[in-house]
Amino acid sequence: QLKKCLKIINNLSYSENYFIALFSKLFCIKIHIELKNIELSNSLIYNTERFIKRNSDKFTVYDSSLFTISRFKEKTKHKTLPKPTFNTPSLSPFHLFLLQ
C-alpha cells in the first residue's frame, strides 16, 4: 500500500501544475522523514529547494514553502542548515499540515 501511495505522489510531482507538483514534492519529503529515510529525505529536500527557488515568481507560496523546507532540514539534521532569517510567514493549511 505504501509503495503504491508513494508512486502516485511521486508521479504528481511531475505535474504541469506548479502547485500540485510542489505540494506532492513536499508531501513526499514528509513521508520519507516519517519513515526515517534520512538520506533520501536530504536529497529530496535539496531538489525541492532548488525547484522552489527556480520558480520564485510563484510568490503566493514561495516564503511558506522555503519555511517548510527549513523545518524539514531541522528534522533531518541537515548538515547545511542555515538559520532562518525570516519570521514565520502566513502558512496555507497544507503547509501547516506538513509541519505537524
Image (tube, helix red, strand yellow):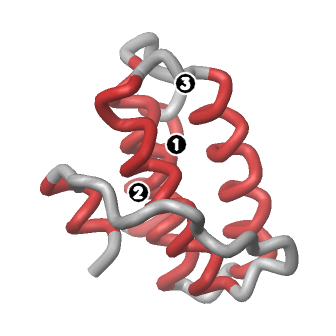
Residue at point 67%, 74% (across, down): 83
Q: Using the image, tell me which numbered label, if any, was put on residue 48.
A: none
Say what secondary structure mark 2 lies in: helix
- Select label 1 or label 2 by which is in front: 2
- Select label 3 or label 2 by which is in front: 3
Q: Earlier in the sequence, mark 1 or mark 2?
A: 1
Q: Residue furthest right?
A: 79
- Select label 3 or label 1 by which is in front: 3
Q: Mark 2: which amino acid?
A: Phe
Residue at point 44%, 48% (across, down): 65
Residue at point 41%, 57% (across, down): 27
Q: Mark 3: which amino acid?
A: Ser
Say what secondary structure mark 1 lies in: helix
Q: Is residue 9 left or right of residue 98?
A: right
Nearer to me, 45 or 14: 45
Q: Mark 1: which amino acid?
A: Asn
Q: Using the image, tell me which numbered label, if any, was put on residue 56.
A: 3
- Whole-number angstrom distance, CA of label 3 to CA of label 1: 22 Å
- Whole-number angstrom distance, CA of label 3 to CA of label 2: 19 Å
Q: Using the image, tell me which numbered label, if any, was put on residue 10.
A: 1
Q: Earlier in the sequence, mark 3 or mark 1?
A: 1
Q: Residues within 10 Å of mark 2 (few under 14, many from 20)?
A: many
Give the residue at mark 2.
27
The quadrant holding residue 78 is bottom right
